[in-house]
Amino acid sequence: MTKRIFALFLCAALAFAADLPVKQITLYKHGIAYIQREGSVASGEEARLDFKNTDMNDVLKSLTVSDRSGGRITGIRYDSNATLEQQLGKFPFQIGQGEMLSAFLDTLKGSRLQVKTSEGVLSGSILSARSVANSGRNDTQITDEQLTLLLDSGDVENIDLRRITSLHFLDARLQDQLKQYLQTIAKANSRDTRSVYIDSASDAGRDLRISYITPAAIWKSSYRLALNESAATLEGWAIVDNTTDEDWNSVKLSVVSGRPISFISLLDRPRFGNRQVAELPEDRAAGPEVYSGSVDGQTVGERNGVVGGTGMAGGVLGGIVGGVPGAAPPPPARAKAFVANQLMAPRAMAQTVEVTSDVVGATGSVLGELFEYNFATPVTIKHNQSAMLPFLSDKVAARKLLIYTSKDGEHPVNAAEVTNSTDKTLDGGPITVYDAGAYAGEALVETLKGGDKRLIGYAVDYGTRITNNFDNGDEHLLEVHSNNGILEMKSSERDHRTYEIKNVDAKAKTLIIQQDGLNEYTVISPKPVEQTATAYRFEVRLPANGTQTLKVEEEKVTSDTLAVASSGSDRLIEVIQNKKLSAEGRQQLQAIVDLKQQIAQTQATLDSGKSNIDELTQDQSRLRQNIDSLNKVKGQEDQVRQYSAKLNDNEVKLAQLRDQRTELTHTAARQNAELRTAIAHLNF
């Protein structure tokens, strides 16, 4: 029964929507449609439109309403979209997924309950409820549920829930909350549409115009290019899909080439903020308070915008829905053949240039950075159907040639250089090419503004073969400069790429070779005919049954840095030996290399001296240990005297080595200071 009532309600809503039929549709390339509806609402009827849940965010940020009969729009209402969790959160209980009845009843301790069993009726307050695991037949586990009631008689009784045939909360408010809880869940599970209601200041009949944007299928463009000796003809078709649940009957349809910025704002979802905890002053202990003086001479009411304010109705509704009570009625719409230019504010402010197309009934209009094709005759497309509509048939400039890239392998492709000589923007899409009345191939083209040109390749040319050889050149140093102890070096590498081309057909051809690498290489020779964002293009004339060679010399310039202080002498010597280094720079770097080598020699001597000191120190320790041992043995006086003499000799050597180390340490410090000064003054 519930499903039947809901179905009848939905049919009534759709029937009402037919009273405000779609009159005009503008389709964009980013999946948005601009819809305009017009219709009359009889006296006493409520103006309502139904939308899909997923469309509400776009509707809420774009909906505009005007009453062309002179009435005032006072507001727009719509069904709220609070989440199910938010709606259920207001109830004093929650029912979990698959939750047992005993668990639910246990959350309502103290609630008065009436239960019916086969023995009779019991009334009381819920004391507790629980599930109990018991053993059944064949050692199987079964779960029983029990309810404990404090009866009105004062007795406490356990009741097996399997004995209960029905139960009823004696608290009418709690019983009603349970009913609302279940209704909320059922409504959330079944709701797929949302209603928008348009309120008016009068109950009289109204003549409404409503416009909004909504997600829609992207329109597509498809072209046919006919090549011949005299001229080329380009024919364009717009493919439009009506994926809605509503027929488009005799609507004014236009399609726009371009991609306006569009996004989704979650306006449909209620937002809840976190509020601070506040207390009344009398709930807190009294204390001193400092009152500040006025700094601008205004009262609080004036500062907050209360005095002389217009309120919410004047500030919001007047700008969104087109009028408020007491405001002047909107001016009547001006009759104009191209009504689409009156719909949205940006289009109303832009200067419109109309261009008549060769296709009967189609006009093209420049809308700022966009371009619109407007079909003058009404269009009918049933729901879940599509249509192909001609929007272009014009002469264009086209030059037949070949295109070759490194990805094409051995053979180039037949191509055409198409120049948009029309005053229209050609939307990007597939092109089917016909040559001399026969199918020649297919290509894709990007959106093409008026006066711009594109190359399109549509078939492999087996009458031309190309080989591509690449030779790496040597790297040469171009420049060396110093800056704060850093050598800044610029080097170049010149490479050669050779194209060997053979034309086996008995007709001359024009070949375009596209060479990638614009961001890395600069072409030295020959001069390219043009360049794209990432590639160079060269044009080669091919004789009939002949060969041709194209040699491209390109240069790759790289920059590198070298820290002089941390670089070894060998690396600096490589830079010194380069012919591109100036004489002044060579002299300064050579002085630094000499200092580095001197420092290295001094450090080597220090390391050797340290090793000698360590060895002598160890010998002295052993000699002292030996002397101590021999002094304890009689008859070893001669050996003790020999060890003592050697100990004295080693002490002299240690003193000399320590003096030498001190001197070398001072020398190393002086040399490092000289090196730091030389690096700091390095400048060329």
Image: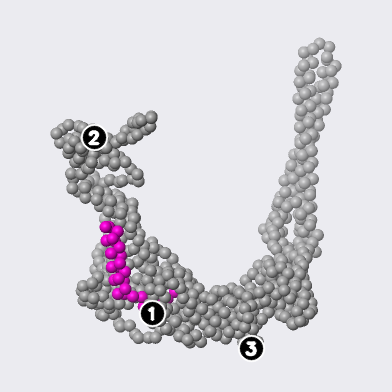
Tell me the quarter of the picture where residue 419 sits: bottom right
**How far apart are labels 3 and 1 at the CA level?**
40 Å
Which is closer to the viewer, label 2 or label 3?
2
Residue 639: % across, % down: 84, 18
Q: Amino acid at mark 3?
A: Ser
Query: In the rendered image, which residue does mark 3 sit on?
Result: 230
Judge whether 604 appears above or below 630 on screen. Answer: below
Is tag 2's residue or tag 1's residue first in the polypeptide sequence? 2
Queried whether the magenta region covers residue 49, the answer comes back as: no
Amino acid type shown at disc 2: Ile
The residue labelled by disc 1 is: 250
Pointers 2 and 1 in contact (CB under 8 A)? no
In the image, residue 575 lies at what x, y percent? Answer: 77, 59
Residue, far top = 634
Determine if the magenta segment contains residue 6.
Answer: yes
- How far is disc 2 from disc 3 in space, using C-alphas? 99 Å
Residue at coordinates 79% horizontally, 79% vertically from top-left?
A: 546
Residue appearing at x 78%, y 44% in the figure: 602
Please give the range of residues in magenta.
1-28
| Quadrant that contains the N terminus | bottom left
The residue lying furthest to the left in this view is: 153
Query: Is 486 above or below relative to 248?
Result: above
Q: Are marks 3 and 1 in contact (CB under 8 Å)?
A: no
Q: Nearer the viewer, residue 253 or 434?
A: 434
Q: Residues within 10 Å of mark 2 (few under 14, many from 20)?
A: some
Residue 16 visible? The answer is: yes
Tag 3, which secondary structure?
A: loop
Q: Residue at x 48, y 77 (%)?
A: 388
Observer-nearest of 463 and 394: 463
Pointer 2: what residue? 159
